[in-house]
Amino acid sequence: MQEQKLNLGTHVAAQYPAESFTRSEAAILQRYFTNLDQPVFAIVNLPEVVKGALFARYSRSPKSLRRLFLDEFADNAPNPEDTRSGEEGEQEASLVGVERAERLYERVFVEFGDDSVAQLGGVHLACEQASNLLTKVLERGRLMAYLEQSTRYIAYNARLPTGRYRYYRGPEILSSPLGARYVGDMDQMFDSYSSLLEKLLGYLPARHPKDPGDSDFVHRQALRAKALDLARGLLPAATLSSVGIYGTGQAFESLLIRMRSHPLAEARSYAELMLTELRKVIPSYLRRVDDPTRGGSQSRYLEQTRESTLQVAKETLSSLRDLGGRSLRSTSRTSEVAKSWVDESIAAVASEVGAHVSLTDFDPQGENKVIAAMLYAASNLSDAALLAAVEEMSDEERAEVVRAYVGERRNRREKPGRAFERTSYRFDIVSDYGAFRDLQRHRMLTIEWQSLGTWLGYVVPDEVVEAGLERGYRHCLEISGALYDDMLKEIPGEAQYAVSFAYHLRYVMQMSAREAMHLIELRSSPQGHSSYRWLVQQMHELIRTKAGHRHIAAAMSFVSTEDVSLERLSSERRSETRRAALKQPGHE
């Protein structure tokens, strides 16, 4: 081994001895590792199965990763002096170590069940033409990364090259007695969306005149975003979207097992499409998905427990009337809903129709526990002793601990540590489906939702009413509701596709105070959609007042209660400033 040269301009690099390789070894390694003489490097140009197998062996070998690769995985590495065509050479390079990696997975992963091995390789997967119901299934896993096509920035008024609007047309729907009706009603709903969007784009410039300091482009973009926000309530859950997913083999395996047992036929068939493509990239990671004794057994377990829970719920809650048989379509977020339509027997289930937030569970001692947790790492006392000490403090002393731990936050991205995870909150929420779609992406918290239907009413945006467009808006939602009612009788499993985003959905969100800070500060920001801004502002107020966690609420210093009429304007201004800066000398 020779001492590494100081070539990074720092004294840090000098302490790491560089590994030595022969010239031919170095020529091979240069294809697959970003450097040969530093202690930190990335692996490139190798199949995912080889990367994962390398790390699996790495954990049980005294060798360096690069030496391990040379000794055990480079048998098929192309000769550096090979002069064959680039495409042929690259194809050979892609096979490096694959045979050994496959054997390793066969032994370690399949035979011995070392699930951690499946965390060591990942895939970027594009999932297109997925309904908005399916996107929520795809985005269920916590340990994956997602980017979804946004209804806030993309208009859905254009037709596909086939001449069709972008909505799900599953065979289970089209072959039903309501197939033709479904297509006709969906087309009407998309026609209504297109018409509303066009009218809003004509109305909003006068409603929100351009500020003298804004460019025409910034103003146009902000108005367009506003129009899309207002119109999206008419889109049905059948609307097709695209989702980009990055996940490990283990995460994809878990996702596919869930999808194969899902009640939606679309989810089950889409799982097979995903499995086919994933096996082209990481076949070894997914061998257990359709193994009858492994993935097959897990899928059956999920299906059986879902069905048995539905059955026991039906039996034990039979004294409560099923809300699904009722329909109150026209509601708004702030109005007091007449309850004459609600029998006393279901009042406990639907105390309010329309958007609302309830804090249903919290720890009255939660704030003291958080403050004790803040002191834990800075002391040598036990958890119990710290909690006793905090309970003896004055309110100002507790506030001082919180101020020290939280510090001077300059923006919402500067978040305090894990002491805020010491307590949690459970919120029962009713909101329009559009808002739910945005909040559901916060996967680190616990979120469960009920079936999408029409019985909790819908919301009509105030500016749609002001623009004189309420009648057409309501007519479209009545088409949606009537189609849902009839599908519920004929093909109940697919009825949700008919429900527009403006209809309400009930769901629960449970989160630590730390996740609450992230969610509430992010979603209350001025550029957020008005429907979920209102929801998270209510969450913040409930933490402060109902839970009585005043110091925790105060630490959420970037919660915005600003009344914003043109939500994307400030964001568009910042984007224009950044674009201008990039055009300055010194920027490529």
Image: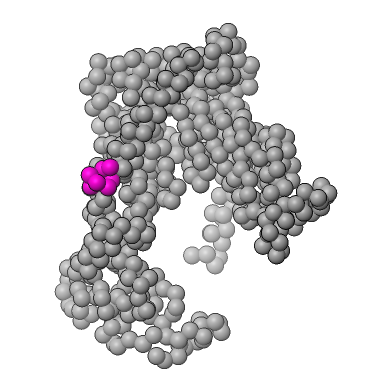
Q: Give the range drawn in magenta.
A: 291-297
Say which residue appears at 41% left-offset and 25% top-offset: 312
Quadrant of the rendering where the N terminus is positioned: bottom left
Point out residue 534 in the picture as x, y percentages from the top left corner. Answer: 62, 32
**41 relative position to 330: left or right:** left
Residue 92: image location, x then y, percent:
19, 69
**Left of 329 or right of it: where is 538?**
right
Note whether 346 is above or below 232 in the view shown. Answer: above
- Marks counted in the figure total 0
Q: Closer to the camera, 229 or 314? A: 314
Q: Where is residue 583 in the image (x, y as percent from the top left)?
A: 53, 59
Vertically, is 20 above or below 350? below
Q: In this view, does 198 lie above or below 385?
A: above
What residue occupies the far bottom of the structure in this picture?
A: 2
Tell me, yes or no, whether the highlighted magenta stretch contains residue 214.
no
- 389 in relation to 564, above or below: below
Q: Residue at x 46, y 28 (%)?
A: 450
Q: Is residue 194 shown to the viewer in this render?
A: no
Q: Which residue occupies the foreground of this view, 342 or 267?
A: 342
The location of residue 422, given as percent across then percent down, is 63, 49
Instruction: Decide which of 273, 380 is in the foreground and name it.
Output: 380
Asked if residue 547 lies left or right of residue 309, the reply is right
- Judge whether residue 345 can be spotted in this image: yes
What's the residue at 54%, 13% (across, down)?
345
